[in-house]
Amino acid sequence: MKELLIRNERCLGCRSCELACAVEHSLGRTLLAAVRETPLPRYRVHVAGSGEGCLPLQCRNCEEAACLNACLTGALARDERGIVVCEEDRCIGCFMCIMVCPFGIITIDPETRRIIKCDRCPDREIPACVTACPTGALIYREVTEATRKRRLEVLEHLRGGLD
């Protein structure tokens, strides 16, 4: 299964991922259409910090997801990809999932009083936030492939320091 990985040293805090996420979850799915919508579309990825200390955060789809156990109505469930998704019609707005999320990623849609969380853009091969990131801080790939690639990068860096 592919995972959404973060290279925090590359994040500039530009919030391109937030904008792309909001547009992807808008009705028109274009920036021009999204800014004209009422209510404005909401993003599901959150850039925390500023300047050098930025980090894009989104649902980690924890193996032992506390939000799944806390959901009173079963609105939160894993889909066929293994992603924790919300069936909005079943959400009653009790916000138990928000209280137990260890990352503080699940938020409230003030218009509907329902939760908003990352769904990894089910209609796309690569999530919109990853595609929009100008520095490659967000990566969507198999963990084993990502770690192998990272080891090669470290090796090249170390070789460069030896010359």
Image (tube, rainbow, N blue to C red):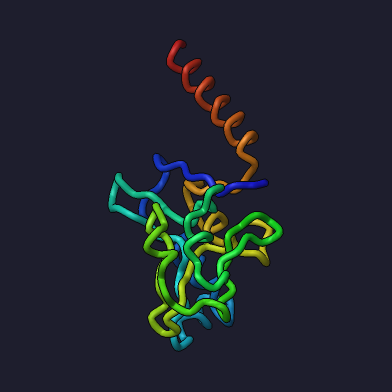
* Residue at the spot 51% in from the left edge and 49% down from the top edge: 138
- Identify whether 17 is placed above or below 24: above
* Residue at the spot 39% in from the left edge and 52% down from the top edge: 102
Residue 151: image location, x then y, percent? 55, 25
* Residue at the spot 57% in from the left edge and 32% down from the top edge: 147
Residue 147 falls left or right of residue 49: right
Residue 69 falls left or right of residue 110: right
Looking at the picture, tell me which residue is in the foreground, 59 or 132.
59
- Identify whether 67 is placed above or below 138: below
Residue 19: image location, x then y, percent? 45, 67
Residue 14 showing in the rendered view? no
Residue 78 falls left or right of residue 19: right
Residue 97: image location, x then y, percent? 44, 64
Looking at the picture, tell me which residue is in the foreground, 68 or 12.
68
Q: Residue furthest right?
A: 80
Looking at the picture, tell me which residue is in the foreground, 155 or 4.
4
The total number of labels drawn is: 0
* Residue at the spot 47% in from the left edge and 86% down from the top edge: 36
Residue 162 showing in the rendered view? yes
